[in-house]
Image (cartoon, rainbow, N blue to C red):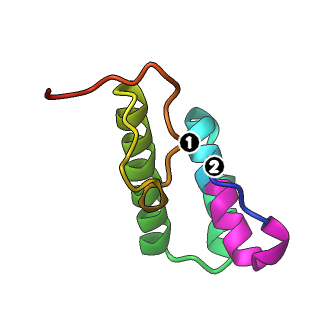
Amino acid sequence: MIAVDEEKLAEKEAVILEFARRSTLEPADITDEDFQKVKDAGYSDAEIMEAQYVMGLSTLETKFCDSLAFVPSRPEVFAVQAAPAPYRTVGT
């Protein structure tokens, strides 16, 4: 997980990041009130959907790479942690 200094974020960004975090870790616990809090912070339905889409793709990428113990040749490009050894080689 990427470390974020929430004190440096505006309140609006902190709200959507918390919503994305909870959507990832506790998706069944998201309520109408949670959506309303994000809307009250100033996000439109389209912006909420976009944030959820990006979060979902990031989650998919992380799970895919972790399951294959994929270690990117340029880790700075990816927002995933390197998988622990032993590394598996796919397609060789």
For the residues marked 2 and 1, what is the alpha-carbon distance in whole angstroms?
5 Å
Q: Estimate how packed mark 1 is, as few (under 14), some (14 to 19) or many (20 or more) residues with alpha carbons within 10 Å.
A: some
Q: Which residues are magenta?
A: 6-19
Q: Is 65 included in the stretch rendered in magenta?
A: no
Whether residue 31 is visible here, answered yes or no, is no
**In the depicted structure, whether residue 63 falls above or below residue 10:** above
State the image quarter where residue 91 is shown.
Answer: top left
Q: Which mark is residue 21?
A: 2
Local SS, label 2: helix
Q: Is 10 included in the stretch rendered in magenta?
A: yes
Asked if residue 24 lies left or right of residue 37, the reply is left
Cβ–Cβ under 8 Å for marks 2 and 1: yes
Q: Which mark is residue 59?
A: none
Query: What residue is shown with label 1?
Result: 24
Measured as percent of width and height from the top left, residue 77 is found at 42, 61
Measured as percent of width and height from the top left, residue 51 is found at 48, 64
